[in-house]
Amino acid sequence: MIFLGRCRTFCSSVGTIEFNKVNYLNRVGQAIYYDTVPIWGRKSRKLTDFTTHFTLIIDTQGRSPYNGLTFFLAPATFQISPNSAGGFLGLFNTTYTDSPRNQLIVIEFDSFVNPEWDPPVEHVGINKNSIHPATYAAWDASSHGGETTDAWVSYNSTTQLLSLEWSYNARNDSRGNLSYQVDLREVLPEQVMIGFAAATGANVERHILQSWEFSSSLNVVKKGEDNSKKWKLAVGIGVPLGVLVLVAMAACVAVWRKKRKPAEEPAEAVASTSMTDNLERGAGPRRFSYNDLVSATNNFSNDRKLGEGGFGYVYKGNLIRENMDVAVKKVSQGSRQGRREYITEVKVVKYKIAMETASALLYLHEEWEQCVVHRDVKSSNIMLDSGFNVKLGDFGLARLMDPDQLGLPTVVAGTPGYLAPEYMATGTVWVWSLLGKRELLSGVDPRLNKAFDSKEVECLMMVGLWSAHPDPSLRPSIRQAIQMLKFESEVPNLPMEMPRPTY
């Protein structure tokens, strides 16, 4: 199982899962089967029959219930949506409640009525691509709080009927059932993820999964597999023989190339190795297997394509285990130039982020109708969209200021990450001393392994020192800082020793 969000297992009860154990308010948790499951075959168009049985507990703890637990089927790339707590049940949000791009089948045990999309009662429902139940039955969650619920979900491929039954261990006379006719081929891809999601809102509610079993009838033959014994025998003989032939051919080619270009090949090999090292440095991109990237991009499908460059295509992907959206550049085979271009792009993005953050501050300080001082600029408040464009967020500490009036804050404003840890703990600063020693670049994060443009980094650090000058009257405006970052103005002559602040 893969646990996402706040989902955890009980240490004291093997196999028991609680979805929002850390904090029961406004939380989301998902428990997903680690592998995809075939629902229908592309070639045969044959649907599977499947059945699943699970036991769950929704414990309202004597309070008003809020919100519910679901069993769902979704594409392998599906992930927790932002802001999906409460009535969104950990699967939807305001953007995706009825999106035509949704591919979801959901069995929901909904303990709270959201009038915007729910029926007027607590209910068990079956949803197709929407937060609105396609069909539902009334369900009294409050009176069954803390009781173990047995649920059976089945799909008949002949009648295309999705059926649900449920009962309570403590009350044999309390049972319910629900069914909905749906062709899963029109809703879901051939391979899907299956699992559970739960969400809480403003009130406390515990969601516990005690057991789960799933079985299906469809056996999809993977590429390269066949049930024919003759084919297996041919593969068993042919593959080793083919490998031997390929190894021999590769050895011959290597010897021929070494004799033909004795000086050029080592240089290219060193360059390729150097680029690989650059790509795997701790502060740079992380290496993923090709299979991971194939899965993340749905086999580099055209609908995931974001753009095209001179040396390959860029695709949108989602890494399920990391719960992370990524951009994947597929460089043309054998294109060393493409690899160099990619490394350059990654380095350029870092400086672009700093420039666009400064531009956002310029807008707040000088270009909007009122002057806004953000007061909490740090990496976690700088967000990037799909095009790696900067969005400055979290205005919790921001203040409106009169540009012509001197502000007199009486306390330090900021949060860890913006204020240096050593400054918060000891009041000591040390970067300025590096300027006096003419060793400014030694203050750069060692995890970068010197994979940066020295001129740009020195410029960034000088702007930082200038902006932190103890004398406020000598600090630059954000417009002056941008001019310096663009190399349109000279670096100021800062003193080699940090000036003493005067009040």
Image (cartoon, helix red, strand yellow):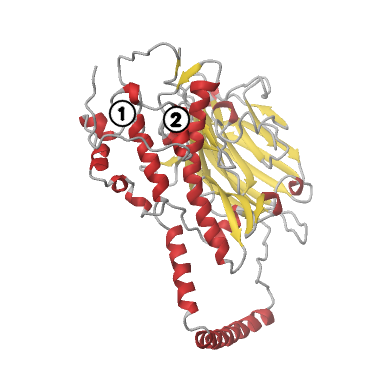
**What is the three-letter code of the residue carrying label 1?**
His
**What is the three-letter code of the residue carrying label 2?**
Gln
Residue 41 falls left or right of residue 72: right
In the foreground, 353 or 288: 353
Rendered view: 184 above or below 115 = below
Tag 2's secondary structure?
A: helix
Q: How many marks?
A: 2
Q: Is residue 80 visible?
A: yes
In the image, residue 159 lies at what x, y percent?
A: 79, 47
Rendered view: 123 above or below 183 = above
Which residue is rendered at x = 52% and y = 45% of the image? 324
Which residue is rendered at x = 76% and y = 57% of the image? 46
Determine which residue is flagged by label 2.
480
Q: Quadrant of the C terminus?
A: top left
Determine which residue is flagged by label 1.
469
In the image, residue 82 lies at what x, y percent?
A: 55, 34
Tag 1's secondary structure?
A: loop
